[in-house]
């Protein structure tokens, strides 16, 4: 999800060329609509979006039982420590700062999609313990 059509198109092309099936959305509302009709193995979100932020979308993804454990990668230009911390608090698994080399992104996507290692996402203070 990215509101910049060029960035979204470039990201899509990189992933499709590697054989991934990709769905895109230019804003969080459209992403939620797509989420209602499809299942996903991974989400790549931008933070700065019109309407709902990527952080809020990540929280909504985490609130759904069917996507609460689906990996979420933030790919964003927001690079302050407080931005990264908010991404972690929202439930992201990885926070990448633009620009990112395509090879690095592909390596991380591949790692999340093929790894049997459980995610080590930081727990929210209000999250119930197992």
Image (cartoon, rainbow, N blue to C red):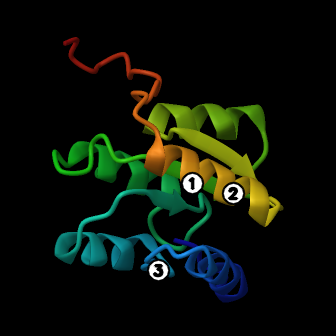
For the question of whether residue 77 can be seen, the reply is: no
Name the spot of residue 14 as percent of width and height, x first: 67, 76
Name the spot of residue 120 as percent of width and height, x first: 46, 24
Q: Which residue is mark 1?
A: 109
Q: Residue at x 60, y 73 (%)?
A: 18
Side of 16 relative to 43 (left or right): right
Q: What is the quadrant of residue 94 in the picture?
A: top right
Give the crowd class for mark 1: few <14, some 14-19, many >=20 residues within 10 Å.
some
Q: Which residue is mark 3?
A: 24
Name the spot of residue 129 as percent of width and height, x first: 22, 11
Q: Which residue is mark 2?
A: 105
Distance from disc 3 to disc 2, alpha carbons, whole Å, reads: 16 Å
Side of 102 relative to 30 (left or right): right
Q: Quadrant of the C terminus?
A: top left
Q: What is the quadrant of residue 86 in the picture?
A: top right
For the question of whether residue 27 can be seen, the reply is: yes
Classify mark 1: helix, strand or loop: helix
Classify mark 3: helix, strand or loop: loop
Q: Are marks 1 and 2 in contact (CB under 8 Å)?
A: yes
Q: Nearer the viewer, residue 1 or 15?
A: 15
Distance from disc 1 to disc 2, alpha carbons, whole Å, reads: 6 Å
């Amino acid at each position: 999800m990215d509101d910049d059509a060029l960035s979204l198109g470039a990201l899509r092309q990189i992933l499709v060329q590697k054989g991934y099936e990709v769905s895109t959305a230019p804003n969080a509302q459209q992403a939620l609509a797509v989420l209602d009709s499809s299942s996903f193995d991974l989400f790549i979100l931008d933070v700065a979006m019109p309407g709902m932020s990527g952080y809020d979308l990540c929280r909504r993804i985490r609130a759904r039982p069917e996507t609460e454990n689906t990996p979420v990668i933030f790919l964003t230009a927001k690079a302050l420590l407080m931005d990264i911390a908010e991404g972690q608090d929202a439930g992201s698994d990885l926070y990448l700062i633009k620009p990112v080399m395509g090879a690095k992104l592909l390596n991380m996507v591949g790692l999340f999609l093929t790894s049997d290692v459980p995610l080590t996402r930081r727990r929210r203070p209000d999250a119930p313990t197992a």
